Amino acid sequence: MSVKIVFIGCGGIANAHMERLAKISDVKFVGMCDIEKEKSEKAARIYGGQVFTDYKKMLKEIEVDACYICIPPFTHKDQEITCIEKNIPFFIEKPVHLDLKKAKKIAEKIKEKKIITSVGYVLRYFDIVDKAKEILKNEEIGLVRGTYWGEVPGGGYGWTHKKEMSGGQLIEQATHTVDMMRYFLGEIEQVFAYKFEGINNKIYQGYNSEDASTTLIKFTNGIIGNISCTWLLRGFSSSVEVIGKDIILTYQGNTITIEKGNKKETYISNLDPMLEEDKAFISSIIKKDPSMIKSDYIDALKTFEVTIRANESMKKGKVINI
Ligand SMILES: NC(=O)c1ccc[n+]([C@@H]2O[C@H](COP(=O)([O-])OP(=O)(O)OC[C@H]3O[C@@H](n4cnc5c(N)ncnc54)[C@H](O)[C@@H]3O)[C@@H](O)[C@H]2O)c1
């Protein structure tokens, strides 16, 4: 079977997926849609497919087996609902939305129609992440610390640092770290967050996100933790440190380190997690079996809720129950 794929959004991350999908033999690109026509034209020239600037027209006019939705957070309108109504499985990039109520409605419809979905929490596809989960199962964990530190994205141009467009750093970027914390340790029931602002907005035009935030987290199983984020630095670093009785497990990029007693072990992954993520989605469509998908819409919604509730806490200065 060849899986007929269309793209809504042909920007940065869409091209990263196209590059991987082109390596999977069962994939055929049939439609490329971007509101900036030159982007859909370029993608179609490289990978194939008809060119569109209107996703509704594309989903109406061509026969599609699966849709990749790779658009900025503020542009989610009814791309997902259109796919669901047409029974089209979809892959969607994180964060799934900026509006929790609308995202919950989408999730309800997905459940009703049993649509296969996959969300771009790509780190889950590192083999070492499964190894870390396996190790943690047998440990008594009490504390977790997440970090997501880096520079203002895109050199201060574009939509990422505008809060109403991206949701801010926690929703747009550190969502990967929050998702990893959930993936390792389970569901989160309470958050309380502080923000710091006032430096980057003097440097970058239109910057209205916080410069830094720190969020306290309580899990339903009693584990406590925090995540600190900042766009005040250069470069990028992100990590999750899980602390238990006589153990620290550190996850960072493609590496996990386990310090237990006086032993220290390091595991490095050589996988391309995005290729694994795309293979899992394509394979789930061919086999009509979503079990290999590690983050579907219903699950990703929970990560989104944690980050949007943390934003609410920053604003209200209150503890928020999830
Ligand atoms: N999983 C990851 O590691 C990862 C990495 C980067 C980005 N992302 C996510 O992917 C999403 C897109 O990010 P990006 O970096 O590709 O952004 P981008 O700005 O490079 O590309 C987005 C594209 O979507 C197009 N677009 C906007 N509205 C549209 C619409 N209604 N119909 C068709 N096209 C439309 C824009 O013209 C643009 O070309 C974001 O949510 C981002 O968080 C995920």
Image: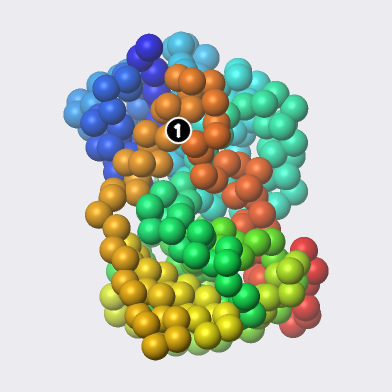
For the N terminus, the quadrant is top left
Specify few, some or many for label 1: CA neighbours under 10 Å numbering under 14, 14-19, or 20 or more. many
In the image, residue 238 sits, relative to residue 100, either above or below, namely below
Residue 94 shows up from this direction: yes
**Kind of residue indicated by mark 1:** Phe
Name which residue lies at 53% across and 85% down: 246
Judge left or right: residue 88 versus residue 186: left
Above or below: residue 20 compared with residue 215: above
**In the depicted structure, whether residue 189 falls above or below residue 62:** below
Per the image, the residue denoted by label 1 is 281
Location of residue 35 with respect to 199 vertically, above or below: above
Where is residue 22? Give x, y as percent. 25, 29
Dot 1 falls on a residue whose secondary structure is: helix
Query: In the image, residue 131 lies at what x, y percent?
Result: 43, 58
Q: Residue at x 32, y 20 (%)?
A: 26
Q: Is residue 275 left or right of residue 228?
A: left
